[in-house]
Image (tube, rainbow, N blue to C red):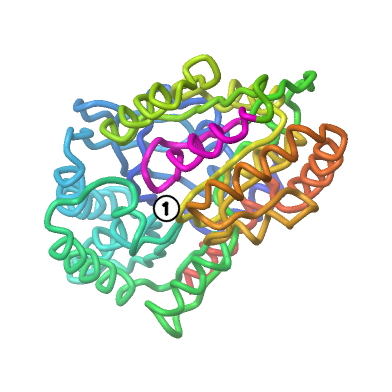
Amino acid sequence: MSYSKKERDSFLTVEKVCFLGGTRYSQPLDETSAKKFRLLSALGEIFVISFAPGVKPRRFYQHAWFYLLPRLPLAGLRYLLMLTAGPALALWLILRHGIRIIVAQSPYEGFAGAVAKKLAQLLGRRVALIVESHGDFEQSLFLQRRVKLPSLYRILMRWTASYAFKHADILRAVSDSTKEQLKRWAPGKPIIQFPAWTDIEAFLNAPPEPPATAVLYAGVLTPLKGVHVLINAFAKVIKYLPEARLWIAGREKNKEYATALRQQVVTLRLNERVEFTGEVPQQELARYMARCRVFVLPSFSEALGRVILEAMATGKPVVASAVGGIPEIVREGETGFLVPPGDAETLADRLSWLLSHPEEAEEIGKQAREFAKRFFSAEAYVEGYRKLLKEAER
């Protein structure tokens, strides 16, 4: 997507914006991230403080200036690095490059942004702070992995989040559920809502293929995502549909959990039926989606489920947990089916029905595709940020 000079000039309400987050970025950027920042560059000059894929820090330019902190091996150390080096680097960018707005992509990065904002004020620089919420920031960490001293973690997390919200000028939610959570934490703060980025065109344009009798899961491998529940459900599915296959695509974010999943497959004698593909780029993921019969997301917590929209865009029905923002996009019997989180029996029943009723599954998939077209577009995403940044400048 490109803009005329007149359109681009109309977007330049903000000159300098710094995104502060925990995402890993490679050099060069993957195709999806490159497209995202190319579009956002229409709003002004973009700076990004985040993490490198390894322990070597990096700085480079590709549609935005990237300052990537070393990705230390322990999550606790990465949090500590972001909460200490993050404010220092953000303050330097404010003083050196005239950053006017910080966009913190969670309440915890928001703490680093708030510290930078306060230090800048002491030096006579006015900076606005936007704090975003992309999920249930209170519970998701504890559903992803085991946390030592969880009570201490909760105290620290509540304190850092409270500090971020106190100093935020405006908030961004990605779903109704995240908006409600933000209202509880920061009553009275203005909130703008629009979905997280996805390269929806890569999925809308995925070449159609004759679907296999296959179920696809895509997402990181952590307990939060409920993949162990899916495997138990699939063991029930193949009793009635022995030709069915399960493809599990995603990064092994929790190594201990990923190992347990593989052992679970062996124990249930599903070795010939289940395939772990590892993490795949979006273009390859789109091909997997085009080849499967049904997409599944059995999460225990989810802000919206961006990957659901991607699957819908390829014309696939979705079976997903009725949590977070998922019911906002999965319409029962229209674009897919909702199941209680952790309920392997109901999950198996819905998967079996879709796999054994290909014509009905195709019709639901068509409705899902039309919904995805209406729900998200690159233009609406950029417009969402234009509105957000304009509001922050007031």
Q: Write down the quadrant of residue 205 in the picture.
A: top right
Q: State the extent of the magenta-drawn residues as a range.
A: 216-239
Percent of width and height locating residue 240: 68, 30
Whether residue 221 appears in magenta in the rendering, the answer is: yes
Mark 1 sits on what residue?
17
Query: Dot 1 lies on which element?
Result: strand
Say above or below: 54 vs 156: above
Which secondary structure type mostly characterizes the magenta part of the structure?
Answer: helix
Residue most toward the front?
239
Q: Is residue 45 visible?
A: yes
The amino acid sitting under disc 1 is Val
At a point 51% along the width and 62% down the height, the residue shown is 389
Q: Position of residue 204 (x, y in %)?
A: 74, 33
- Comparing 109 with 248, the one in front is 248
In the displayed structure, would residue 184 be above or below residue 331? Answer: below
Q: Nearer the viewer, residue 70 or 212?
A: 212
- Residue occupying the point 57% across, 62% down: 175
Residue 71 placed where, x, y %? 23, 34
Quadrant of residue 247 within the rendered picture: top right
